[in-house]
Image (cartoon, rainbow, N blue to C red):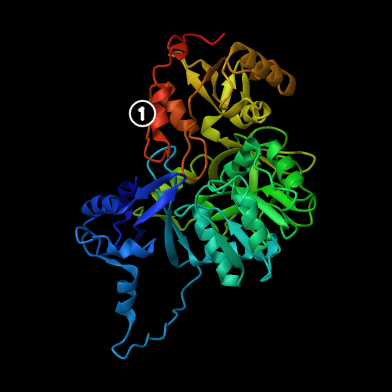
Amino acid sequence: VVVNRFKLVNPKIIITIDRFQNNKEEIEMLSKIKEIVKELPSLEKVIITPSKKDSKLKDISGIRNSCFLDDFLKLGVDEDGNVPRMEFEQVSFSHPVFISFTSGTTGLPKAMIHGSGALMATTKNFWLQFDSTRENIWFSMSPVGWVSWIVIGTLCFSGIGVLLYEGVPFYLSPTYFWDLIEKHKITNLYLAANVVNDLEKLGYIPTKDHDLNSVKQATSVGSAVMPRGFDFMYNQINKDILFCASYGCTETLGTCISMVPSLPIYKGESPARALGIDIQCVDKSGKPIAGEYGELVIVKPSPVLLLGLWKDEDGSLRRKTYYSKFPGKFSIGDLAIVNPVTKGFIICGRSDNTLKQQGTRFGSSEIYNVVDMFHEVRDSLCVSQYNKNFDERAVLFLKIRQGYHFNAEIVERIQKAITQELTSQHIPNVIIEAQDIPYNMNGKKMEITVKNIINKRPYNPDNVINSECLENFKNIPELQNFYYCL
């Protein structure tokens, strides 16, 4: 995965760590780095950050052009032991600053170029959109390498405190997440949506002794939060916080739709456009719509938009990818509904994963919202399957919670609930058990990957963190004889 992305840009320097902890598993990185370096002849230096006191005892001689961090820092010290004064260079608003990579869910990863203006625009969001001050302390659980890692970094421009946490927040204990909030007097939570959903599903609630009154705001990113997640946050922290699901993407460097402190929050919705971003929900002709499915587009220039794609010298790939579907509008590729009453946005997933069964078009998030009400179900995934005549049916995979069993009774109750909450046309034609649900590092369900597998199309497993589960979606007997969806 790393090599595929880095080969796009031919880096000269890599900064890495020697090992890290992933739940109960310790991941040793030096052997991986050694193999990565072999594939990147452009590398001039590999800087290794020790994770423990004894990390520097490790042998790194087999890694070309490598050194530990403190040895690298010594290169910047004069002979007299002084560090030269840093000189800052004035650059243009659109000066390229960094590259971030897309997840590669729908194709090869793309290397996005963002500029200094995007960083300034993101800083503006924290000050104005979130009403942050230097008295705030943000708790971020964004993984390194995700665009939100860069977004959170802009808090430092404003002197706002940040607590960074990598990994699962309840690995050490069911209350460790709440312990951290209380200990550090956190005011703002910046959470991956799957963390909120997991806390609620697992029942990891604060004790009566936890003091969480410092928390004023919480926002989730990465994917949709189930409606029950809203109830959970308000009930378990306090009823006076502002909690909403923010929406953004790699191409826009962060938030496009989020909270506004002066506006009410409605369960399951993102309440308002970010300042300076004219994002709309449009129909197939590009006209704004409300109350029905549409595609999200940005209709006016904004400094948050990517400057370009690496090695796309003439901009042709950028135009084809983002402007060909709706000329003159930046197409994000996500599906949403605008509530005609509240004007809030309901994010429904990728537009290329919309389901259409028996003439009814719907998003997978609608199914998840219903299935999430069942305690026996740990997780779920819903995608389309096609036959040779391109007839389509929805297939729902259920991961059953430990201690329960998949059976006809659960299926029947889910079918009944979908009929009551939606319509009978929304009931997936096939409902079967899955041992696990694939995710990427951003906490997004890999719907497109599973969709490709069950339709016997090529797929890319590189960005799936639990890729071993993909084998379970191959050659499923219940899916082999689909000729016509009744």
Q: Position of residue 17 (x, y in %)?
A: 36, 58
**Foreground: 302 or 121?**
121
Q: Left or right of 222: which side holds 38? A: left
What residue occupies the far bottom of the structure in this picture? 80
| Image quadrant occupied by the N terminus | top left
Q: Residue at x 36, y 52 (%)?
A: 312
Q: Residue at x 73, y 23 (%)?
A: 421
Q: Which image quarter is the C terminus in?
A: top right
Of the pair 290 and 159, the residue shown nearer to us: 159
In this rendering, position of residue 85 left or right of residue 326: left
Residue 8 location, x and y as percent?
32, 51
- The residue shown at (51%, 57%) is 149
Q: Which picture quadrant has residue 376?
A: top right
Three-letter residue code for mark 1: Pro
In which quarter of the view is residue 48 placed?
Answer: bottom left
389 above or below 373? Answer: above
The secondary structure type at the circle numbered 1 is loop
